[in-house]
Amino acid sequence: MKRIVAVMALAALVAACSSTPDSEQAPASVEDRTGGKPSTTDVKPITPTVIPGTQFSDPARDPRLKDPNNVLSKRSVYFDFDSDAIKPEYVPVVEAHAAFLRQYKNAKMLIQGNADERGSREYNLGLGQRRADALKKRLVLLGAQESQVESVSLGEEKPVCTDHAEDCYAKNRRDDMLYGHEF
């Protein structure tokens, strides 16, 4: 009796695992929403956005990177305590650097993620990496090539301010963007 039940269970299992051959399945239907023949007059090519200014074959020679009146001279993005979210006030800076990287496909950027001295060394290294990765992700989403941007964490090892006060801590919670000729 046990053998009969076992054989029946095995047969049911094999039948349940079998699949229907592809030749018996109906193909997926496609709905035409163009109203007939597609029009080529509605198709507009996408032109890449270029930052206004002089083109240089070497991005390091572009004067906008050193012009204090240009957004590209701003190289730091600051963060709130224990956060890796890019503040809205730094979005124009990030967008400008993404456009620069789109314009110069040969440009390389290093993002150094930093943290203030509060927290363990390991925690701050992780937080710095999350901050650098968040900025890299935003640049890539805005059109920079992933191969152009590298993100590293310095944790609390590169402070710009060493006082033990909140305004000083705020200066150390940052990402620094460096271009290839600067690292």
Image (tube, rainbow, N blue to C red):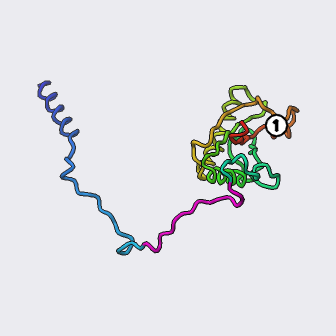
Q: Position of residue 150 (x, y in %)?
A: 63, 38
Quadrant position of residue 116: top right
Q: Is residue 150 magenta?
A: no
Q: Position of residue 136 (x, y in %)?
A: 63, 43
Q: Which one is in front, 115 or 42?
A: 42
Magenta stretch bounds: 40-55
The answer to whether 2 is drawn above or below residue 40 in the figure is above
Residue 53: say if magenta: yes
Report helix, strand or loop for mark 1.
helix
Q: Residue 115: which quarter of the image?
A: top right
How far across and down, in percent of the image, does residue 179 sit? Answer: 70, 42
Q: Nearer the viewer, residue 46 or 167?
A: 46
Query: Mark 1, residues whose alpha carbon is within 10 Å: few (<14), some, or many (≥20)?
Result: many
The quadrant of the image that shows the C terminus is top right
Q: Position of residue 10 (x, y in %)?
A: 17, 31
The residue pinned by badge 1 equals 169
Task: Please name the residue shown 58% across and 59% down the image.
Answer: 48
Furthest toward the front, the residue is 57
Above or below, 147 against 49 in this view is above
Q: Is residue 111 visible?
A: yes
Residue 117 horizontal side relative to residue 101, left or right: right
Magenta span: predominant SS is loop
User: Going by the image, does 163 lie left or right of 13?
Assistant: right
User: In the figure, 46 relative to 11: above or below?
Assistant: below
Question: What amino acid is found at the position of numbered circle 1 in the picture?
Answer: Tyr
